[in-house]
Amino acid sequence: MIQFAITVSLVEQARGGPFVYWDGVRAAFQDAKQLGYDAVEIFAPSADFVDRQELQKLIEETGLKVAAVGTGAGMVVHQLQLCDADVSRREQAIQFIKDIIDFGAEFNAPAIIGSMQGRFDKVEGKAVAIERLTEALNRLGDYAGQKNVPLIYEPLNRYETNLFNKLADAADYLRSEKIANVVLLADLFHMNIEESNIAQALIDAGELTGHIHFVDSNRQAAGFGHMDFAPIVKALQEIGYSKYVSAEAFPIPDAATCAQQTIKKYQELFPR
């Protein structure tokens, strides 16, 4: 059964970004529970920012889970990325992600690598950047495996990275490089920009689809844009997807409305 998740950002430098909740973990968990969500996805500035005991208490009180934990603050706050030409900076990026993996693993939640993947420049070129990405994903996938969680890699649109923009291309890359314990995040906003057929891209990625940011074409709550969700839902059924759909959406017109609209659309598209 597909699980329903919603996002909370604790990173002040990212305020205004596509996260539904911004007022702390407790408020997010309590509101998500009231609305009928199954889990909360957490975007934190560092691995030690969230009080582990408080989070565990919230999980026990609400019965909700942690869907995933984001690493994007490594880029937003510290400008760390896995393709950096400076080896010491690359190692700092890897350590930041390892720390986030440790945090998430305490709650059986995988870490997401999105913006921290970086990009290639004209000086060194794409091949060098892909080599660095491959080395990092191999190391981090193995590390996450030791913690009994997968690692999630997210293809982004062309305006955010020039490495992998399409889901199937990223899937082919993971398969050809035999990168273990790494799955893909299918973000419908990025896919709406890059894919000629979102449903077919999901089918092509198949079992490597490990997490979904389920939003509308304009990165608002599902139902507030022009996305045709019917073929997407059919594709998810075809590949037997049963993990999270998570709202990494702009809180437009406000967080409450966004959260309410999202759960309404989830329940419509994925009836229980």
Image (cartoon, rainbow, N blue to C red):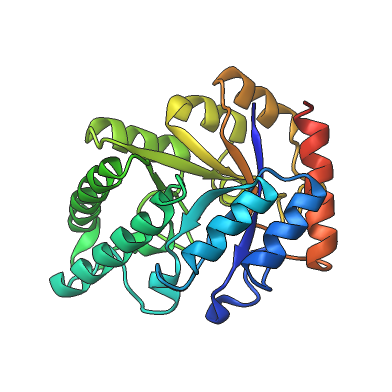
- Tell me, yes or no, if residue 126 can be seen here: yes
Q: Foreground residue, 116 or 59?
A: 59
Q: Residue at x 54, y 31 (%)?
A: 202
Q: Nearer the viewer, residue 10 or 195?
A: 10
Instruction: Tell me which residue sits at (72%, 45%) in the image.
Output: 37
| Quadrant of the snapshot with the N terminus | top right
Give the total of numbered labels. 0
- For the C terminus, the image quarter is top right
264 w.r.t. 117: above or below? above
Residue 9 picture location, percent across and down: 59, 68
- Front residue of 90/59: it is 59
For image coordinates 72% across by 49% down, the residue present is 216
Find the residue positioned furthest to the left. 87
For the question of whether residue 189 can be seen, the reply is: no
Q: Is the residue 105 above or below the residue 204 in the image?
A: below
49 with respect to 86 (left or right)? right
In the rendered image, which quarter is residue 117 located in? bottom left
Look at 48% across and 56% down and name the residue there. Answer: 69
The image position of residue 111, as x and y in percent, is 42, 52
Relative placement, left or right, of 244 versus 253 is left
Where residue 120 sits, quadrant-wise, is bottom left
Where does residue 182 sit, x and y in percent of width and height? 34, 40
Compared to residue 204, the image places residue 41 above or below, namely below
